Image: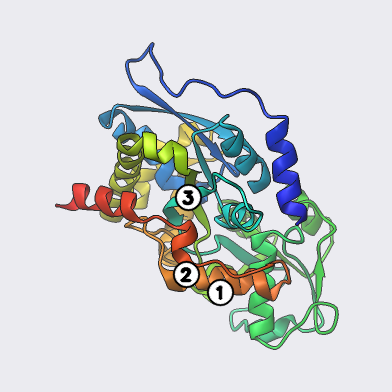
Amino acid sequence: MKKISAIALSALFALAPLSACGEDSGLTKLRINEVTHSVFYAPLYLADALGYFEEENLEIELTNGGGADNVMAAVLSGDSDIGFCGPEAALYVLIGGSNDVPAVFGQLTKRDGSFLVSREDEPDFEWTDLKGKEILAGRPGGVPAMTFEYILNRNGLYDGTDVTLNFDVQFNLMTSAFEAGTGDYCTMFEPVASEYEAAGKGYVVASVGEASGEVPYTCFMAKTSWLEKHEEEAEGFLRAVIKALKYLDETDAATAAPYLVPYFESTSAESLAISIESYRAIDAWQSDLMMTEDGFTRLQDIIDNAGELERRVGFDELIDNSYAQQAYKDVYN
C-alpha cells in the first residue's frame, strides 16, 4: 500500500532515537508526536497545563507531525515515544507485516471533530440537501474525507454522481479556498467553524461526528517493545489525560478555556470556550480512553467503504485497553 511505503521510507531516514528521560527536571520525558495541533485535543493540553503530567513524574515534549504518516514514521524509528493520530496509521503498519507493530493503548476522541459549513443559513438542513453540490472535505485517503464519504453513501449520495467532493485543496488551505468562492460547503474544525460563523462568512449546519456515529478518531499508540519496557510511564500518561477529562466534565468551559490560551496564543479564551462547548455537545471525547469493538469495526467500515482497506484486522491484533483500564481505575477508585 502507498501509505505503508510512505511510512517505511520516512522511518528509514528518521533521526536516531533520543533519550526518553529528562534528567534536568528530574521528570521522565515522554516525546509525543501529534498529528496536528487542535483544540479538538483540549484534554491533552489541559493535562499539561493543570500539572497532571507532573503529578505523574512526567514531562511532555510535544512535536507536531503534520500528518499521520509522519507521526507513525517517528514512532517506528524511535524518534518519538508515543504517537497521537488516527489508529488507521497503526492499522496500515499491521497489515504491512511489521515485526514491531505499534499498539493503540488509549483513545482520546471518539468522533470526527469537523463541522459542515454552508454559504447559506439552513436551519432545517438534511444530508440529502447536498445533492448536486460541491464540498471541500479533506484530502483523498484521509479519515476526515473517508468519514464524510461514508456519511454521504449512507444517505444515498455518491461522489461524481450525486455530489462533487473536491479533493484538490490542501487541508490547511480549505477554509481560505472556500472563502474565496470554491465549493458550496466546507468542513471545518473548531475554533475555525464557530469563528467563521461569528464573522458572518458562513453557517454551521451539521456535525460530521454526530452523523458518522462513534469512531476511534485520534488515539495514543506506541511500539509494543516500548510499552513492555515503560508500562509505568504509559499508565501515568493516561492517568494524567483521564484527570483532565474529569476536570472538563466537572468544570464550565469559561473556567477551563484560559488554561488553553498558552497553547493557542492567537485564539481568545472566549473562542476556546465556545470550541469546548461545541465538542462537549457532540460528546467528542472518550472519558475512559478505552476503544470499543463497535467503534473499531465502524472505522474499518469507513476505510473499506473508501476502497482503502486490504484486509480486516481483529480488535485484539491492534488494540490494548489494559493500560487505559488500569489508569481509569486508578483515577476513579
Q: Is residue 232 above or below residue 325?
A: above
Q: State the residue at coordinates (78%, 54%).
A: 2
Q: CA distance from mark 1 to mark 2?
A: 11 Å
Looking at the rendered structure, the kind of residue marked 2 is: Gly
N-term-proximal mark, 1 vs 2? 1
Q: Position of residue 70 (x, y in %)?
A: 66, 40
**Is residue 221 shown left or right of residue 146?**
left
Say which element carries label 1: helix
Q: Position of residue 115 (x, y in %)?
A: 60, 64
Q: In the rendered structure, are the residues bearing label 3 and label 1 in contact, judged by CB atoms less than 8 Å apart?
A: no
Q: Is residue 55 visible?
A: yes
N-term-proximal mark, 2 vs 3? 3
Q: Is residue 171 visible?
A: no
Residue holding disc 3: 103
Residue holding disc 1: 212
Say which element carries label 3: strand
N-term-proximal mark, 3 vs 1? 3
- Hey, which quadrant is residue 168 in on the image? bottom right
| Of labels 3 and 1, the one closer to you | 3
Q: Position of residue 32 (x, y in %)?
A: 50, 35
Q: State the residue at coordinates (66%, 73%).
A: 304
Q: Position of residue 251 (x, y in %)?
A: 28, 50
Say which element carries label 2: helix
Q: CA distance from mark 2 to mark 3?
A: 16 Å
Q: Is residue 15 above or below residue 151?
A: above
Q: State the residue at coordinates (67%, 46%).
A: 69
Quarter holding the N terminus? bottom right
Residue holding disc 2: 295
